[in-house]
Amino acid sequence: MNDFELLKAVHNKLPQAYKEVQVPYLKRYSQFLAQGGGFTDERAKQLFRQYWVGYFIFHYQQKQKEYDFWELNARPYEVQLKFAKKMYAQLVESNRR
């Protein structure tokens, strides 16, 4: 599964409120790929990270928790990818129950 497929799979399992907020991030990523961008391109990695920064900002706002945008934005692609894979595994497991 490539990064975009992973992101789309997780996105589709999110609560509706999260999906609505995250759609623009997902669209930007898909447009980049449709225009010939590759999954290993630096821009693709930036778009992947942007999705998760947006996710965490919305999540923390929903929980009324404080967050630091710059700390969220500084998380490397690899950290965001690891989180996405972990979240996907949890979502798959919860669907099996």
Image: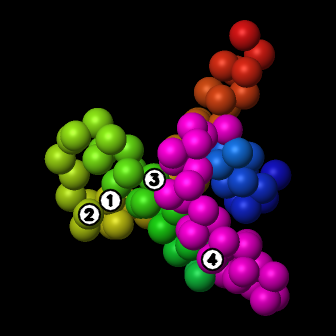
Provide the residue designation for mark 2.
69
Numbered range of the magenta stretch = 13-41
Residue contact at pointers 3 and 1, CB within 8 angstroms: no
Task: Residue at the far left: name it.
Answer: 66
Expressed as whole percent of the image width and height from the top left, the position of residue 44 reads 63, 76
Residue that appears at 29% across and 47% down: 61
SS category of the residue bearing label 2: helix
Q: Residues within 10 Å of mark 2 (few under 14, many from 20)?
A: few
Between 28 and 18, the one nearer to me in the picture: 18
Between 54 and 47, the one nearer to me in the picture: 54
Provide the residue designation for mark 1.
72
Q: At label 1, which amino acid type do we have? A: Leu
| Upstream in sequence: badge 3 or badge 4 | 4
Choose mark 3 or mark 1, whichever is in front: 3
Residue 18 magenta-highlighted: yes
Provide the residue designation for mark 3.
55
Q: Is residue 10 left or right of residue 77?
A: right
Q: At label 3, which amino acid type do we have? A: Tyr
